[in-house]
Every structure is written in structure tokens, then in C-alpha cells.
Image: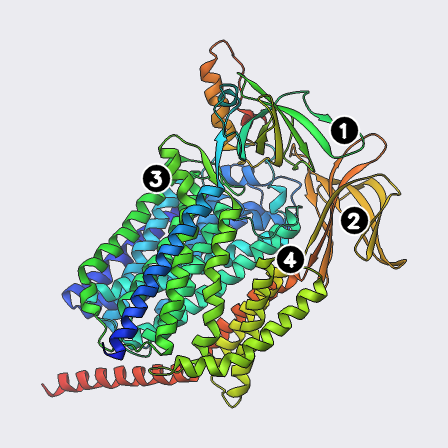
């Protein structure tokens, strides 16, 4: 019964989304106010209906309705309540439903918070968002319906994948989707502007906030994904250049380019076409990422069960969105021609350079990700290894780190690079000193690691220097930028340390055996069976001590879930500000209780995630810019006056 | 030339140089890090890169896993039901590694019989079969019409 309602709501929401796509646009074409005004209420109703559908799916999981195929496939009688709720978005169908719900939420938010936009502008934006939403609802209805039924219902479900029975999994996908989908707002704005053939500051200022927010969510989603992989997959890595990770990283890279270019195009009439193109690219990459993940065309640890029809459908959507927007761009871009020239020695130019660097990075990662597909078309099976991505990314990020302080230092409009270099020289010297000191303290670091540290110190020292120089500045966007750039530095530092100064040891340990590693000693006390909520586990005991003093007893587990053939490794971590001690179990090697054990020391690994959090905080802080609020208020007043004048004009006539 | 023009020219030259160097590095990095995938049948036919790492995939043959008693050395046989390749590895096998299930290993051929793995992956979808390994098995199955076994281990769970 409930499932039928959910199904029915989905169909209704498809109709609503199609209406949202058509009606305001027709209103715009005919200059009909009543039709354009329908956009907002339609957006609210759409969100309510989609949300109810999503809540119904959650309810079906909570109530254990095994007549619903999706529920029995991903739940079981023994699954705890909290994981029954999160199982809703644990696999393909439900995660797409969540995607649509978040999309509808963004559409409703756009409808609500758009007082600075003219009637015809908001009508076009909502209509484009309607097309996107309709596309994804059609996708779920025709290829991945979560409300499909099985009769007779099985007595018990297949259980949720144990890797997903975890806190990280509860929050990681929603945040990531908020980011992916949030980029659709900037995309919709660009397309709407192309249709209207005009884009001015207040459009970009308006979309900048949304892009910032989407970017912040995306950043958080990626960090959480990385953190989850680190503690849950049991082999201590934090990023694998896996196609699915790349799928989330690509829109992030393009989004980073976009938010930096928007800072220019919002202030002056320059780089307008480039802004539009980047916005189209960023969202198209979100959809491309979804295609890569869901179609099964690329081998990945995350891959959902492959289904060619789903892949084809998303490819169709991608062609429609990206192809449509790009054709429109080719046809109308000349109308967005920028009128103000940009000087070489200026912040504008530096921000342009930033976007170029990030776009090059985007395409490097993209090429590495889709190359196996291209080769496969020619009958060769290949894969592109992590070293390719690692090396390329390292090289591309050198100019990024090098130019970052210069870009923040130099003035708008017309500055002087020479003066900038002169002013920053002392910072460069101190960065070199700090790096040398750190390398000496660590005791040997390879070239890449040293370069990474140098970049980290350079960005940090120069950013802090700028803050001290402008200490009177209470401008939120300046502070936001500073915090985000600190994030870059902290991330670089953590990454260089953990990648180039970590210790990994896979060893065979007999009960009672002690292994010394740096200043620490690890004593293996053997493995015992323990009973937990919905699984049994072989739990090892490893006593970590330093100079004879016990620091902690780590208890890594090998978990066995009743419905899974394979065990699952659960690492045990002693987290720390300067290093993590990470222990996980491999497998039992012989009958005398000897086990394969991984003992890792990961210096400063937490700093990477902390750096990400700083970036996120910076982006959020920038939302509260007083300058932008003033400009928006002015725009709003202007609109109101305009409308008032129209009304009065109508009365006198 | 006016200073502006000079600057512009310099910029263009720099961009070109950057693009050229970038493309060069890109191609080099690509060439070095592309990894081919080979099935046991292809390896038996001698169709594999001799000097560099590649991926091998197939099914871990039942009862073929041998563990050393005092180290993390293991050896097992990867098969596509046409040909077998023995794989040696030192390290911890992934959770999803199992006899009778799909596996992908990265490494080099030591001689024509023995593959020495640097890394063993048991990447797979929710049906417990890496797509590459499944394709290799599929090809093996097609080649040998006498074999009547079903390999779609996805039905097991």
C-alpha cells in the first residue's frame, strides 16, 4: 500500500517537473506574467511530493516491508534500526531517489531565495532546473524504480553491505549529492542567461552564493569519503584515484575554477563567457560522474551492479544537458561578450590563470579516468594506474601553489607583479627555512614531499602575512578567502607528510610477539571471538607502548556477518594530532594463532581533512559578505521601484 | 614593439611552451602508467608485456592456495578454465579474496609459468565478480564448449 503511494507520488512528481520545465518558459516566451508566476508554487509542490516519496521509502525500510524488492535486497531482520534508515540510500535506486529529493530541495530553495532576480529571469532559471529534475525522475521511473515489488515476499532480506553499516556512510552520500546537485543552479543560471542573451553582475553575484555553497558541500562530501575509506576499508589509504573518487573530484576541480572566475565576473564585465562555460562544465561533470559510476563501464571498487540501460539513459541525459547547453553556448555566446579589458598585472588575470590551472587538472584527471573506456572500444583492456594521477597532479599543482600568494596579494584592475614579488620575497625565504627545518626534523624526505612542504609553508606564511597587513579588514569574503587558503596549506602539509614520511609494515605476528617501529613497540596478544549486535568478530589485541609505558590497546577486528561470504576488516586507530597509529588484521596464517597484521604510522593524516574543513569554512564564511549583501539590497530596491513605476504607469494610463 | 605588445608576445610564447611541456609530460606519464589486462589464455599464448607490470585476471582455482608457515608469502593459481597461471605474492590478501572467486593481480611474469604479484585486488561488484575477471572467464567458457560448469557465482548469495 505504502509502496504504491510512493510509486504514485513519483509519477506525480514527474508530471510536476515537466510542468515546471514548460510553463514558466512558455510564460517567458509569451511575456505572460501569470504563467511565469506559476514557477515558484510549482517548485514548492514538486519538492513536497518528491520528499514524501523519499520518506515513504525510509518508512518501508523501517517497517521491513520485504514485498518491496529494493528493501529485501538491502536490509534484513537483524539489521539495526539506524542502518535500516541509512540503507535507503545505500544502493543505486534509493541513492537516485535521494539525489532527486535534494535536487527538488535546491529548486525550492532557488524559488524562495531569489528576490534579487526579475520575474522573467527566475522563470527561466526554474524552467531549466525543471528540465534537469524531470530528466532524473524519468531515469528513476524507467530504469531504477525503488518501489518495485516482489511476490511472494521473501522471509528475510539479503542484508546491507557491511561496509555501509557505518557512520561515514550515513553522511557521506547526502553531502556529496548536495554538492553535485547544487552545481545545477549555476548551470541553470548560465543556460537561462544564454536563452535571454544577457548576463550582468547581479546574475553572477546571485549564482556565486549558490556555487559557493555547492562547492562547500562537495568539499565536505569528498573529505568524509576519504576519511571513511581510511578507517573502513582496512588498508590505510585515503585516496586511490579510483574512477568513483575521480567522479566526485572532477566537478570539484571545475567548481574550484568556477568560484575563482566568478569573483572577477561578478565585479566587472569580463570573463563572462568563460564563467558560463565553466558553470556548464562543472555540472556536466557531475552528471558524467554519475554515468561512470552507475553504468558499470569502468571497473571500480564502488561500482553498483552494472546495467547497460541505466548507463544509456544517463548518457542520454548527459547529451541532453551538456550537449544542449554547449550548443546554446556556441550559438549565443557572442552576446555575452565582455566589454572591459583586463590588465596583465592584475588580480583578474591571476584568477584567470587559476581557472586555467584547475581546468587543465580537470581534463588530466578526466582523460585518465575515461581512457580505459576508449581503449576498450579498440579491444584492448587497460587501466591507468595511480602513479599517473599522482605525478600529473603534482606537476599541475606546482604553479597553483606558486601563484596563489601572488594572486591574493596583487590588486584588482591594475597592480604590479614586480612589487608583489618584492613584497612576498621575505615570505618565500621564511617558507624555505621552515621547509628545511621540517625536512631535518623528519629526517629525510624525497623531492616530491619536500616540494609539497615548501608549497604548504609558502601558501601559509604568505596568506597569514596578507591577513596581518590587512588586519583592519572585517570583510567576510576576504576572511573567507584567507581561511580557505589556510586550508590549502594545511592540506598540502598533511598530504606531503602522510604520503612521503609514513611507515607501513605488514608482518606475521605470533601471540606474545613484539614488534618495534620507530619509538613505539607493538605487542600482539592474540585473537579472540566476540559477539556483537549483528555480527561475530575475531578481535585482536595489540598493546602499543612507548618507552615501556602503555599508550593504548588497539582492538582490530575481522567481522563476520551472517549473510556475507566474506569477512570485513575493521581497523583500530589511535588518532593523534601529529600521527595516527593504525592496526588492522590480515588473515590467520597458521593453527598456532599467528596472524598477518598491518601496522601503520600515519603522520599528520588528520591535517588533510582539517585542511578540507578549513576550505569549507572559508567558502561558508564568504557567504556573509557585507559588500554582496549591500549590492543585493540595492538590486532588490531597484526592482521594487521598477515594479512600482510600472504599476503607477498602468494606473495613469 | 610597444611594451604591451612585448608582454603579450611573451605571454603567448610562455603559454605555448607550457602547453608543449605539459603535453610531453602527459604522454610520458601515460605511457609509463598504462597497464594492460591479460587473461591466462593470452599469457599461455605468450601475449603479454615481458618487462613491465600488467594485470592478470580470472578465478582463483579451488584448493590451489598455499601459505608459507613463517612469512606472508602465498601462492595460488588463477584460471580461466582453459589455462592456468601460478601467482606468487607476499603480503596481506584482501578480504574479498577467496578460492573459487574472481581476482585481479598486478605484477610481472617471472618466467612463462610464474606471475609475481605486487598487488592483489579483489575488486568486484555486488555479485562478487570483477568485471575484467568475469569477461576473461566468459571468453574461456566460449572457447571450451565441453565445459558445462556455470561460473556466474553471483547466484550463490
Discs 1 and 4 carry the same chain letter: no
Q: What chain letter is assigned to the residue under label 3?
A: A
Q: Which residue is mark 2?
A: A555
Q: Percent from the top left, x then y, of residue A206?
A: 35, 73
For the residue labelled by badge 1, is the local secondary structure a helix, a strand or a loop?
Answer: loop
Q: Is residue A416 above or below residue A172?
A: below
> Circle 1 marks a residue in which chain?
B
Q: Secondary structure at mark 3?
A: helix
**Tag 1 near tag 4, CB within 8 Å:** no
Residue A184 appears in view: yes
Chain ID at mark 2: A
Q: Which residue: 62% across, 37% down?
A: B118
Camera-near label (4 vs 2) is 4
Task: List the residue tagged with mark 1.
Answer: B68
Name the residue at 45% across, 39% down. A298
Between B91 and A59, the one nearer to me in the picture = B91
Q: Residue at x 19, y 86 (%)?
A: A645
Q: Position of residue A491 (x, y in %)?
A: 58, 65
The residue mark sitting in front, 1 or 3, is 1
Label 3 to label 2: alpha-carbon separation:
46 Å
**Tag shown at residue A498:** 4
Task: Read off the residue under disc 3.
Answer: A312
Mark 1 surroundings: few (<14), some (14-19) or many (≥20) residues within 10 A: few
Q: Locate the N terminus of chain B and report the quarter of the image it occupies.
A: bottom left
Amino acid at each position: 500500500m505504502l509502496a504504491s503511494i510512493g510509486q504514485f507520488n513519483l509519477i506525480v512528481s514527474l508530471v510536476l517537473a515537466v510542468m515546471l520545465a514548460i510553463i514558466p518558459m512558455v510564460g517567458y516566451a509569451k511575456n505572460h506574467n501569470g504563467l511565469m508566476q506559476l514557477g515558484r508554487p510549482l517548485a514548492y509542490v514538486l519538492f513536497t511530493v518528491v520528499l514524501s516519496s523519499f520518506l515513504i521509502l525510509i518508512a518501508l525500510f523501517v517497517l521491513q516491508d520485504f514485498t518491496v524488492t529494493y528493501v529485501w535486497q538491502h536490509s534484513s531482520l537483524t539489521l539495526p534500526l539506524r542502518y535500516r534508515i541509512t540503507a535507503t540510500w545505500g544502493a543505486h535506486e534509493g541513492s537516485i531517489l535521494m539525489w532527486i529529493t535534494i535536487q527538488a530541495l535546491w529548486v525550492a530553495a532557488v524559488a524562495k531565495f531569489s528576490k534579487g532576480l526579475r520575474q522573467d529571469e527566475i522563470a527561466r532559471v526554474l524552467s531549466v532546473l525543471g528540465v534537469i529534475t524531470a530528466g532524473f525522475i524519468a531515469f528513476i521511473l524507467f530504469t531504477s524504480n525503488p518501489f518495485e515489488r516482489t511476490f511472494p515476499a521473501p522471509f528475510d532480506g539479503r542484508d546491507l553491505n557491511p561496509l555501509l553499516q557505518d557512520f561515514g556512510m550515513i553522511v557521506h552520500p547526502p553531502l556529496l549529492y548536495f554538492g553535485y546537485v547544487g552545481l545545477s543552479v549555476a548551470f541553470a543560471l548560465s543556460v537561462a542567461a544564454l536563452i535571454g542573451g544577457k548576463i550582468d553582475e547581479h546574475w553572477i553575484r546571485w549564482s556565486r552564493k549558490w556555487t559557493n555553497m555547492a562547492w562547500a558541500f562537495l568539499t565536505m562530501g569528498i573529505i568524509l569519503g576519504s576519511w571513511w575509506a581510511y578507517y573502513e576499508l582496512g588498508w590505510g589509504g585515503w585516496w586511490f584515484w579510483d574512477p568513483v573518487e575521480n567522479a566526485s573530484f572532477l566537478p570539484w576541480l571545475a567548481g574550484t575554477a568556477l568560484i575563482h572566475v566568478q569573483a572577477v565576473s561578478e565585479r566587472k564585465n569580463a570573463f563572462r563567457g568563460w564563467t558560463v562555460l565553466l558553470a556548464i562544465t562543472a555540472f556536466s561533470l557531475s552528471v558524467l560522474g554519475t554515468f561512470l559510476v552507475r553504468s558499470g563501464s569502468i571497473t571500480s571498487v564502488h561500482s553498483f551492479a552494472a546495467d547497460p540501460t541505466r548507463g544509456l539513459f544517463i548518457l542520454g541525459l548527459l547529451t541532453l544537458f551538456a550537449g544542449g547547453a554547449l550548443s546554446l553556448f556556441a550559438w549565443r555566446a557572442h552576446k555575452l561578450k565582455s566589454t572591459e579589458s583586463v590588465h596583465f598585472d592584475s588580480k583578474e588575470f591571476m584568477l584567470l590563470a587559476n581557472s586555467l590551472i584547475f581546468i587543465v587538472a580537470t581534463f588530466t584527471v578526466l582523460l585518465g579516468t575515461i581512457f580505459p573506456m576508449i581503449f576498450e572500444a579498440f579491444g584492448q583492456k587497460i587501466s591507468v594506474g595511480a602513479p599517473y594521477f599522482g605525478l600529473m597532479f603534482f606537476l599541475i599543482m606546482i604553479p597553483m601553489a606558486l601563484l596563489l600568494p601572488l594572486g591574493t596579494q596583487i590588486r584588482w584592475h591594475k597592480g604590479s607583479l614586480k612589487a608583489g614579488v618584492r613584497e612576498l620575497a621575505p615570505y618565500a625565504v621564511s617558507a624555505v627555512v621552515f621547509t628545511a627545518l621540517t625536512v631535518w626534523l623528519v629526517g629525510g624526505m624525497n623531492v616530491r614531499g619536500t616540494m609539497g612542504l615548501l608549497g604548504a609553508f609558502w601558501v601559509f606564511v604568505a596568506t597569514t602575512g596578507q591577513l596581518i597587513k590587512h588586519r583592519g579588514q572585517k570583510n567576510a569574503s576576504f576572511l573567507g578567502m584567507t581561511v580557505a587558503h589556510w586550508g590549502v596549506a594545511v592540506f598540502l602539509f598533511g598530504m606531503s607528510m602522510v604520503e612521503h614520511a609514513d611507515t607501513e609494515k605488514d608482518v606475521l605476528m605470533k601471540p606474545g610477539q613484539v614488534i618495534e617501529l620507530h619509538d613505539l613497540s607493538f605487542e600482539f596478544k592474540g585473537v579472540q571471538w566476540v559477539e556483537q549486535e549483528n555480527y561475530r568478530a575475531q578481535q585482536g589485541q595489540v598493546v602499543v607502548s612507548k618507552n615501556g609505558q602503555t599508550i593504548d590497546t588497539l582492538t582490530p577486528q575481522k567481522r563476520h556477518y551472517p549473510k556475507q561470504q566474506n569477512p570485513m576488516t575493521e581497523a583500530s586507530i589511535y588518532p593523534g594530532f601529529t600521527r595516527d597509529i593504525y592496526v588492522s588484521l590480515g588473515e590467520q596464517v597458521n593453527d598456532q594463532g599467528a596472524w598477518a597484521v598491518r601496522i601503520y604510522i600515519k603522520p599528520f593524516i588528520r591535517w588533510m581533512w582539517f585542511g578540507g574543513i578549513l576550505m569549507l569554512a572559508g567558502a561558508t564564511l564568504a557567504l556573509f559578505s557585507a559588500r554582496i549583501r549591500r549590492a543585493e539590497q540595492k538590486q532588490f530596491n531597484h526592482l521594487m521601484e521598477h515594479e512600482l513605476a510600472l504599476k503607477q504607469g498602468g494606473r495613469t494610463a | 614593439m610597444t611594451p604591451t605588445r612585448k608582454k603579450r608576445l611573451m605571454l603567448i610564447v610562455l603559454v605555448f611552451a607550457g602547453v608543449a611541456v605539459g603535453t610531453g609530460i602527459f604522454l610520458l606519464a601515460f605511457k609509463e602508467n598504462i597497464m594492460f589486462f591479460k587473461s591466462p589464455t593470452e599469457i599461455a599464448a605468450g601475449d603479454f608485456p615481458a618487462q613491465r607490470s600488467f594485470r592478470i585476471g580470472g578465478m582463483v582455482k579451488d584448493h590451489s592456495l598455499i601459505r608459507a608457515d613463517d612469512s606472508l608469502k602465498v601462492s595460488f593459481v588463477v584460471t580461466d578454465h582453459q589455462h592456468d597461471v601460478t601467482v606468487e605474492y607476499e603480503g596481506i590478501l584482501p578480504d574479498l579474496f577467496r578460492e573459487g572467486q574472481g581476482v585481479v593481480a598486478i605484477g610481472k611474469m617471472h618466467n612463462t609459468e610464474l606471475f609475481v604479484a605486487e598487488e592483489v585486488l579483489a575488486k568486484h561488484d555486488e555479485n562478487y565478480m570483477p568485471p575484467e575477471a568475469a569477461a576473461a572467464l566468459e571468453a574461456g567458457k566460449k572457447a571450451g564448449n565441453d565445459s558445462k560448469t556455470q561460473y556466474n557465482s553471483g547466484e550463490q548469495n
